[in-house]
Image (cartoon, grey):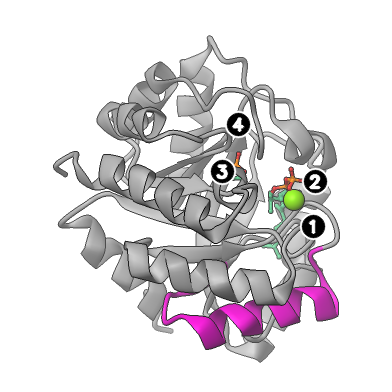
Amino acid sequence: MKMRIGKVERLILNKLENSKLHFVLIDPDDVPPKTAGRLAALCEETGVDAIMVGGSTGAEGEVLDSVVKAIKEASGLPVILFPGSHGGISKYADAIFFMSLLNSRNPFFITGAQALGAFTVKRYGLEPIPMAYIVVEPGETVGWVGDAKPIPRHKPKLAAAYALAGQYLGMRLVYLEAGSGAPEPVPPKMVKVVKAAIDVPLIVGGGIRRGEQARKLIEAGADIIVTGTAIEKSSSLDEARKKLEEINRAIKSVCP
Ligand SMILES: CC(C)=CCC/C(C)=C/CC/C(C)=C/CC/C(C)=C/COP(=O)(O)OP(=O)(O)O
Ligand SMILES: O=P(O)(O)OC[C@@H](O)CO
Ligand SMILES: [Mg+2]
């Protein structure tokens, strides 16, 4: 049997040779297809590297499909599913973060949803990208829904231990999540300690609203920054453009 790295993962790895990356999360529960398409086009224009689609609640079925389709029609960016369960799978996407919430108390979020979704991913020909998902305080909706035991903000070594365990289990990405809409992002000190422990790329998301925060996280060792709320909640497309430009500039200003 030959295990192959897929197209989207290869693209991410190639891009990481030259710069740090910015992914934007669109939640189909909050953003209708037309707006999702407009935001995706804006993301492409301003230099965002990929679009993630998902949500803890309600991002399933027709609602999910129509948002993924609208994004694919409006932009050439890779669309990566960010599922809250096996319900969050759409055949119109390019890839899926095949994630395990390593610090959940509930086996459903560690291996259960994955088993229930595995054959759907295969049938749709989606590219699975194995990812260790670690929820840090406060964790917000995903911490509650995913029944996480959130990593205390002042215990970076605990996060590093989960991250390294994820790598040793074969996961090719690590995602540190403070929770969508968190008042503060994951502490840069924690990012630094996690990065020093692992060899796979590190994604950081949750509560990142300003370029300055993104820059500090990148300087601490993040490879990919995820923003959702900051873009989603912009009052107009013009505001969203300014936000995207501010955060992209901050991310790309740090040399790899
Ligand atoms: C790989 C497969 C098939 C399933 C994985 C299932 C797992 C492990 C999910 C982890 C737990 C979970 C509920 C993740 C959801 C992550 C996500 C899409 C967060 C987006 O933000 P929201 O939590 O929707 O925030 P708001 O409600 O504030 O928008
Ligand atoms: O909405 P925000 O706070 O940007 O968080 C994005 C992402 O990390 C959620 O999974
Ligand atoms: Mg949501």
The magenta segment: 59-80
Which x, y percent locates residue 31?
Answer: 72, 63
Q: Amino acid at mark 1?
A: Gly
Q: Amino acid at mark 4?
A: Ala
The residue tagged 1 is 112
**Quarter that holds the C terminus:** top left
Q: Amino acid at mark 2?
A: Pro
Q: Earlier in the sequence, mark 3 or mark 1?
A: 1
Mark number, residue 107: 2
Secondary structure under badge 4? loop
Q: Is mark 4 within 8 Å of ligand 2?
A: yes
Query: Label 1, label 2: how many angstroms apart (C-alpha)?
Result: 6 Å
Q: Are circles 1 and 2 on residues that touch, CB within 8 Å?
A: yes
Secondary structure under badge 3? helix
**Quarter that holds the N terminus:** bottom left
Residue shown at the point (27%, 49%) measured from the top left: 20
Secondary structure under badge 1? helix
Residue shown at the point (30%, 71%) measured from the top left: 11
Which x, y percent locates residue 174?
Answer: 46, 45
Nearer to us in this view, 216 or 175: 216
Query: Label 4, label 1: how many angstroms apart (C-alpha)?
Result: 23 Å
Q: Are circles 4 and 3 on residues that touch, CB within 8 Å?
A: no
The residue tagged 4 is 178
Query: Label 2, label 4: how many angstroms apart (C-alpha)?
Result: 21 Å
Secondary structure under badge 2? helix
Q: Is mark 3 within 8 Å of ligand 2?
A: yes
